[in-house]
């Protein structure tokens, strides 16, 4: 039964584009010691990775303190997501051209006219 369900999903599945959350991308790009949080040193050297935009005062000690809600000296992924004023988003909609056009010219149109 499971094989039939999987086959049906593969054959009749819907096409969708659900872009990934950009905040972990920002965090991963700037978390140099890979501890899952940004230290003050990492924050002061932080950059916005290609493909993202951020409405944050990067490299600002006061912004770091504002985002560090539990005052542990690090900005966690949850703290970065929690501040509504800390907007990190895609610079362009990753789904803007979904579904992607086939370069061969077949756009699922019937050959019978």
Image (tube, rainbow, N blue to C red):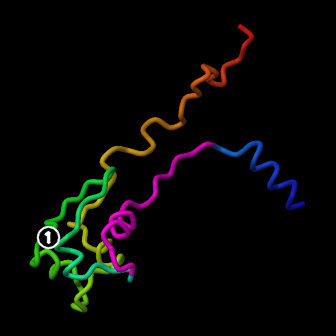
Q: Can you say whether 67 is above or below 111 in the image?
A: below
Q: Can you say whether 106 is above or below 18 in the image?
A: above
What span is in magenta? 15-34
Answer with the quarter of the image where residue 36 lies.
bottom left
At which x and y percent is residue 86?
23, 66
For mark 1, does the 10 Å Cα neighbourhood hold few (<14), some (14 to 19), or many (20 or more) residues? some
Apparent side of residue 28 relative to residue 99 in the rendered image (left or right): left
Q: Residue at x 59, y 28 (%)?
A: 102
Apparent side of residue 51 relative to residue 15 in the rendered image (left or right): left
Q: Nearer the viewer, residue 66 or 58?
A: 58
Answer with the quarter of the image where residue 26 lies.
bottom left
Q: Residue at x 74, y 42 (%)?
A: 12
Q: Quadrant of the C terminus?
A: top right
Query: Total of numbered circles in the picture?
Result: 1
At which x and y percent is residue 66?
16, 79
At which x and y percent is residue 28?
38, 69
Q: Is residue 20 magenta?
A: yes
Of all residues, the one furthest to the right in this rendering is 1
Of all residues, the one furthest to the front in this rendering is 33
Mark 1 sits on what residue?
59
Answer with the quarter of the image where residue 112 lies.
top right
At which x and y percent is residue 7?
82, 50
Q: Residue at x 32, y 71 (%)?
A: 81
Q: Residue at x 29, y 73 (%)?
A: 80
Q: Quadrant of the N terminus?
A: bottom right
């Amino acid at each position: 039964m499971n094989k039939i369900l999987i086959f049906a999903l593969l054959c009749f599945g819907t096409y969708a584009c659900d872009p990934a959350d950009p905040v972990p991308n920002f965090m991963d790009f700037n978390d140099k010691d890979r501890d899952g949080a940004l230290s003050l040193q990492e924050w002061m050297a932080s950059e916005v990775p290609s493909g993202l935009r951020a409405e944050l005062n990067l490299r600002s000690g006061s912004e770091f303190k504002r985002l560090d809600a539990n005052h542990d000296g690090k900005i966690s992924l949850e703290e970065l997501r929690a501040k509504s004023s800390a907007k990190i988003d895609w610079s362009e909609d990753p789904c803007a051209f979904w579904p992607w056009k086939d370069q061969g010219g077949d756009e699922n149109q019937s050959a019978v006219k």
